[in-house]
């Protein structure tokens, strides 16, 4: 049964690996690029241009000048309190944790594939569980951050980064779904090799 099931698992887990890789890249892109929320760039109460706000950096386009990117960790830059990004600190924490879970899932693919060929059931089930667990965390957190900004912010001001994170989270959900489905697959069902199949009892 194990040998027959392995053929299907190789294809399905291969697809899950590709989805995990692309999902991680999209989650990273959504976390780092300064394109979460668009607003007016303000200096106090004076409009000085437009701003594309991100979780870790902002892009300020002042009137008649080139756009400049500022990291929020840079002490020389302070985002004007009048440039509103709804729940940005909460979303920053959620998305950062979700992206970290995505990276951990990517790392878990190494023991996942290593023990895939092992006959030691405990090792295989442990690595499967860790892979599924980190994937679900990455999927949930990257999607929930997008739902928060879409529900609390002006939909017209939402930029491309939440979309990237949301798609990344969706890819993790798909990856987990197909990986879990193949765990239930039985290549011997309906044959005499399977002692609990209807065909066995009919003979």
Image: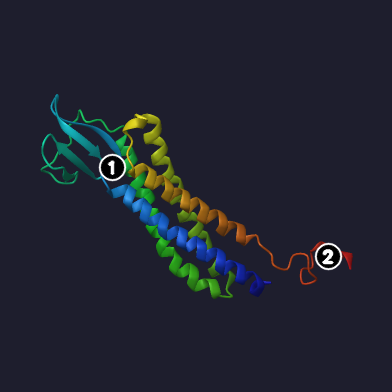
Vertical placement of residue 24 versus 126, above or below: above
Image location (x, y in percent) of residue 147: 42, 37
Residue 45: quadrant of the picture: top left
Are the residues at dot 1 and dot 2 in contact (C-beta closer than 8 Å)? no
Residue at 56% x, 59% y is 179
Q: Nearer the viewer, residue 61 or 123?
A: 61
Residue at left offset 13%, top offset 41% = 77
Q: Position of residue 7 (x, y in %)?
A: 61, 71
Residue under label 1: 35
Question: Badge 2: few (under 14), some or many (20 or more) residues near its Cα, within 10 Å?
Answer: some
Colour basis: rainbow
Quarter of the image that includes the N terminus: bottom right
The front one of 40 and 129 is 40
Q: Secondary structure at mark 2?
A: helix
- Residue found 33% across the figure and 53% down from its top: 28
Q: Residue at x 16, y 32 (%)?
A: 49
Which residue in the protein does label 2 denote?
A: 199
Q: Indicate the position of residue 185 as horizontal and vertical percent values.
A: 66, 62
Marks 1 and 2, Cα distance to the nearest angstrom? 58 Å
Label 1 CA crowd tier, 10 Å (few <14, some 14–19, many 20+): many
Depth check, mark 1 against mark 2: the one in front is: 1
Please give the count of numbered marks on the rendered protein.
2
Give left or right: position of 124 versus 89: right
Q: Is residue 61 left or right of residue 164?
A: left
């Amino acid at each position: 049964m194990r040998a027959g099931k392995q053929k299907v698992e190789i294809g399905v887990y291969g697809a899950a690996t590709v989805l995990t890789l692309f999902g991680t890249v999209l989650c990273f892109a959504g976390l780092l690029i300064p394109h979460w929320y668009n607003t007016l760039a303000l200096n106090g109460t004076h409009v000085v241009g437009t701003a594309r706000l991100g979780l870790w950096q902002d892009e300020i386009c002042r009137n008649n000048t080139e756009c400049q990117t500022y990291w929020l960790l840079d002490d020389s830059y302070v985002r004007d309190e009048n440039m509103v990004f709804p729940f940005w600190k909460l979303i920053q924490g959620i998305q950062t944790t979700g992206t970290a879970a995505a990276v951990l899932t990517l790392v878990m693919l190494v023991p996942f594939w290593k023990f895939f060929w092992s006959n030691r059931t405990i090792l295989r089930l442990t690595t499967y569980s860790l892979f599924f667990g980190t994937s679900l965390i990455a999927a949930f957190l990257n999607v929930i951050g997008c739902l928060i900004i879409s529900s609390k912010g002006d939909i017209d001001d939402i930029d491309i980064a939440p979309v990237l994170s949301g798609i990344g989270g969706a890819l993790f959900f798909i990856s987990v779904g197909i990986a879990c489905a193949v765990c239930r697959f039985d290549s011997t069902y309906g044959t005499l090799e399977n002692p609990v199949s209807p065909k066995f009892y009919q003979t």
